[in-house]
Image (spheres, helix red, strand yellow):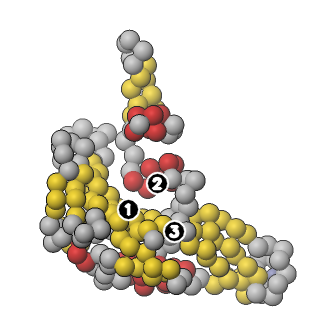
């Protein structure tokens, strides 16, 4: 399943013996979300001219919800809502009539946040509930980045997944290990992608 999915990416491949193909899948979590979750955007951004000229209204599907990364790092991941609210309040100018234009966002039933590995935090500091545009979301999990200590310069590191179960326990999924394991909520993580759903 994962192999079939990765074959649809833009990864460089090499034919080996016996009909075996090797894919160089070195990529980061941002690439994976943009490429493989493209049909599932977190939001629709609609730029609307407040003067109603309607000439240059534009719509854009957003893979990930916009965030103000400084608010996330300064609050040690506690102010994710404020970080999103701050990024969604952007006003602009209509490029057609130069009146004020504003962005109207329709948020999906899931929210993907790309923190770009901006820092570490304890799992319990990441807000469990998140209310954006009057919808309340629940924290489901995150991808955790482990930088490489390999001498192979082509190796960019490793990702593991932390999933928050409805009973409040955290589980760690690491494909270098045989089974998932339960993790303390005080564990330190380096989130790259954080996922909330309704
Ligand atoms: Zn206008």
Question: Does residue 96 appear to the left or right of 169 in the view shown?
Answer: right
Badge 1 crowding class, 10 Å Cα cut-off, few under 14, some 14 to 19, many 20 or more, is: many
Q: Nearer the viewer, residue 177 or 73?
A: 177
Earlier in the chain: of badge 1 and badge 2, it is 2
> Is label 3's Cβ within 8 Å of ligand 1?
no
Element under disc 1: strand
Q: Residue furthest top?
A: 18
**Residue 175, position in %: x, y?**
25, 43
Looking at the image, do the residues carrying marks 1 and 2 touch, with CB atoms under 8 Å apart? yes
- What is the C-alpha distance between the residues marked 1 and 3? 17 Å
Callout in the foreground (3, 2): 3
| Residue position for label 1 | 193
Looking at the image, do the residues carrying marks 1 and 3 touch, with CB atoms under 8 Å apart? no
- Decide: is 114 above or below 135: above
Q: Nearer the viewer, residue 180 or 71?
A: 180
**Residue 113, position in %: x, y?**
43, 67
Earlier in the chain: of badge 3 and badge 2, it is 2
| Residue position for label 2 | 33
Element under disc 3: loop
Name the quadrant containing residue 77: bottom left
Q: Nearer the viewer, residue 147 or 33?
A: 33
Badge 3 crowding class, 10 Å Cα cut-off, few under 14, some 14 to 19, many 20 or more, is: some
Badge 2 crowding class, 10 Å Cα cut-off, few under 14, some 14 to 19, many 20 or more, is: some
| Residue position for label 3 | 109
Residue at screen point 18% across, 45% down: 179
Callout in the foreground (1, 3): 3
Q: Residue furthest front?
A: 167
């Amino acid at each position: 399943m994962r192999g079939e999915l990765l074959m649809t990416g833009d990864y460089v491949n090499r034919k080996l013996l016996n009909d075996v193909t090797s894919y160089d899948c070195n990529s980061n979590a941002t690439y994976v979300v943009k490429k493989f979750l493209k049909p599932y955007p977190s939001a629709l951004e609609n730029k609307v001219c407040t003067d109603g000229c309607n000439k240059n209204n534009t719509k854009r599907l957003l893979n990930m919800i916009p965030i103000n990364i400084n608010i996330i790092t300064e609050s040690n991941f506690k102010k994710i809502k404020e970080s999103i609210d701050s990024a969604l309040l952007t006003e602009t100018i209509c490029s057609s009539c130069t009146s004020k234009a504003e962005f109207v966002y329709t948020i999906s039933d899931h929210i993907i946040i790309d923190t770009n590995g901006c820092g570490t935090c304890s799992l319990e500091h990441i807000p469990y509930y998140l209310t954006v545009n009057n919808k309340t979301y629940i924290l489901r999990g995150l991808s955790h980045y482990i930088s490489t200590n390999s001498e192979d310069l082509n190796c960019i590191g490793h990702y593991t997944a932390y999933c928050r179960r409805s009973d409040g326990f955290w589980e760690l999924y690491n494909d270098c290990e045989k089974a998932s394991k339960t993790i303390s909520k005080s564990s330190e993580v380096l989130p790259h992608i954080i996922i909330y759903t309704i």
